[in-house]
Image (tube, rainbow, N blue to C red):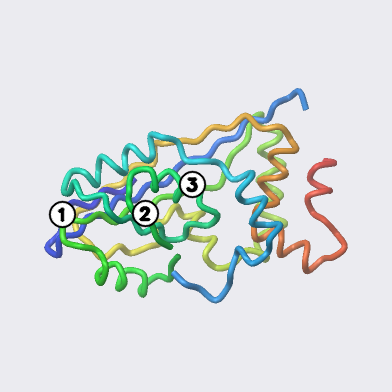
C-alpha cells in the first residue's frame, strides 16, 4: 500500500496491491483496447473475479477521512464490472470510471479537490496451494499466455511499481491478502475472465485453452 501524505498541491495518494492466494478444494486511462466488449468475458469477470475484503474499503475510507468528511463523490477509475464500485457506492453519493498513464494524472490534477484523496489499488497474480498446482499454474501463466496479454498487464505483475506517481511523501504496504477456497471449476471460471485467455481462444479457434487446463 502506498500512502502519499498531503503534498504542496493538496493531494494525497493511497496505493495498495493485494497478494491474491487461492487454495484448491481437493474434493473436486482510456486505452486502445476494450476489455469488456465481450459479453461472455464480462459475465465471467463479474462471476469469478475475487471480491475485495471489507478491510480494503475500511483502509480507504479511514485514509480519506483523515483530511475530509465529504464523501459526496468517488471516481472509480478502471471499474471493470463493478467489484469496487458497489462497495464504494455504500459510502459515497456518486462514483465514476477508466485510465491512461500521464493523461490519468493530468486528469487527477484537474478534478481532485485540495484535501481530496487519490486511491490506487488492485490484486497481483495469484498463487495456488498445494505447490504442484501452483507449479502447473505458473508454467501456464508464464509460458502460454504472455503474447496474448495487452501491454497493461506488466503494471499488474509489477504491483504498480512501474508507475511514477507525481506527488510527494508516499510509502508502500503490500501486506493485505485475499484468500479463496475454490473448486477447479471456479478457478477455471476465474481464468476465463482473463483477457489473455479470451484472446488465445479467438486466435486459436476452435481450441479452448481452458478445456485443456481443466482436464490436466
Gap between marks 2 and 1, in whole Å? 16 Å
The residue where tag 2 is placed is 120
Name the quadrant of the N terminus: top left
Does residue 82 appear to the left or right of 28 in the view shown? left
Mark 3 vs mark 1, CA separation in Å: 25 Å
10 Å crowding of disc 3: few (<14), some (14-19), many (20+) = many
Tell me the residue at 17%/49% (across/down). Answer: 68
Disc 2 to disc 3, C-alpha distance: 11 Å
N-term mark: 3 or 1: 1
Instruction: Please tell me in which quadrant of the rendered image residue 166 appears.
Output: bottom left
Q: Secondary structure at mark 2?
A: strand
In the rendered structure, find residue 123 and report the number of the disc placed on it: 3
Q: Residues within 10 Å of mark 1 (few under 14, many from 20)?
A: some
- Position of residue 199 measured from the top left corner of the image (x, y, whole percent): 71, 65
Looking at the figure, which quarter contains the C terminus? top right
Task: Say which residue label 1 marks.
Answer: 6
Is residue 176 toward the left or the right of residue 10 in the image?
right
- Residue 102, compared with residue 148, is above or below; it is below
Relative image position of residue 63 (x, y in whole percent): 25, 44
Q: Residue furthest right?
A: 206
Q: Is residue 65 above or below residue 208?
A: above
Of mark 2 and mark 1, the one earlier in the sequence is: 1
Describe the element under mark 1 as helix, strand or loop.
Answer: loop
> Residue 104: x percent and y percent?
36, 70
Residue ID at (83%, 48%)? 212
Circles 2 and 3: CB distance less than 8 Å? Answer: no
Q: Position of residue 13 (x, y in %)?
A: 27, 54
Extreme-front residue of the structure? 93
Task: Please tell me which residue is depicted at 36% across the width and 73% down the height of the picture.
Answer: 102
- The one of 63 and 144 positioned closer to us in this rendering: 63
Q: Secondary structure at mark 3?
A: strand
Amino acid at each position: 500500500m502506498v500512502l502519499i501524505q498531503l503534498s504542496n498541491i493538496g493531494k494525497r495518494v493511497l496505493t495498495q496491491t493485494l497478494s491474491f492466494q487461492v487454495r484448491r478444494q481437493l474434493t473436486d486511462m482510456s486505452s486502445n483496447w476494450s476489455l469488456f466488449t465481450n459479453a461472455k468475458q464480462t459475465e465471467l469477470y463479474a462471476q469469478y473475479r475475487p471480491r475485495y475484503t471489507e478491510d480494503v474499503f475500511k483502509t480507504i475510507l479511514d485514509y480519506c477521512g483523515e483530511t475530509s468528511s465529504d464523501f459526496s463523490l468517488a471516481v472509480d477509475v478502471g471499474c471493470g464490472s463493478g467489484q469496487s464500485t458497489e462497495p464504494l457506492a455504500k459510502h459515497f453519493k456518486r462514483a465514476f470510471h477508466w485510465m491512461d498513464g500521464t493523461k490519468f494524472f493530468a486528469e487527477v490534477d484537474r478534478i481532485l479537490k485540495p484535501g481530496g484523496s487519490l486511491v490506487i489499488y488492485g490484486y497481483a497474480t495469484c498463487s495456488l496451494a498445494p505447490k504442484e498446482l501452483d507449479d502447473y499454474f505458473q508454467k501456464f501463466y508464464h509460458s502460454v499466455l504472455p503474447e496474448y496479454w495487452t501491454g497493461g498487464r506488466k503494471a499488474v505483475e509489477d504491483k504498480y511499481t512501474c508507475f511514477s506517481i507525481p506527488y510527494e511523501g508516499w510509502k508502500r504496504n503490500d501486506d493485505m491478502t485475499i484468500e479463496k477456497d475454490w473448486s477447479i471449476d471456479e478457478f477455471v471460471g476465474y481464468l476465463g475472465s482473463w483477457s489473455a485467455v479470451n484472446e488465445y481462444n479467438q486466435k486459436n479457434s476452435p481450441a479452448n485453452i481452458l478445456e485443456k487446463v481443466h482436464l490436466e
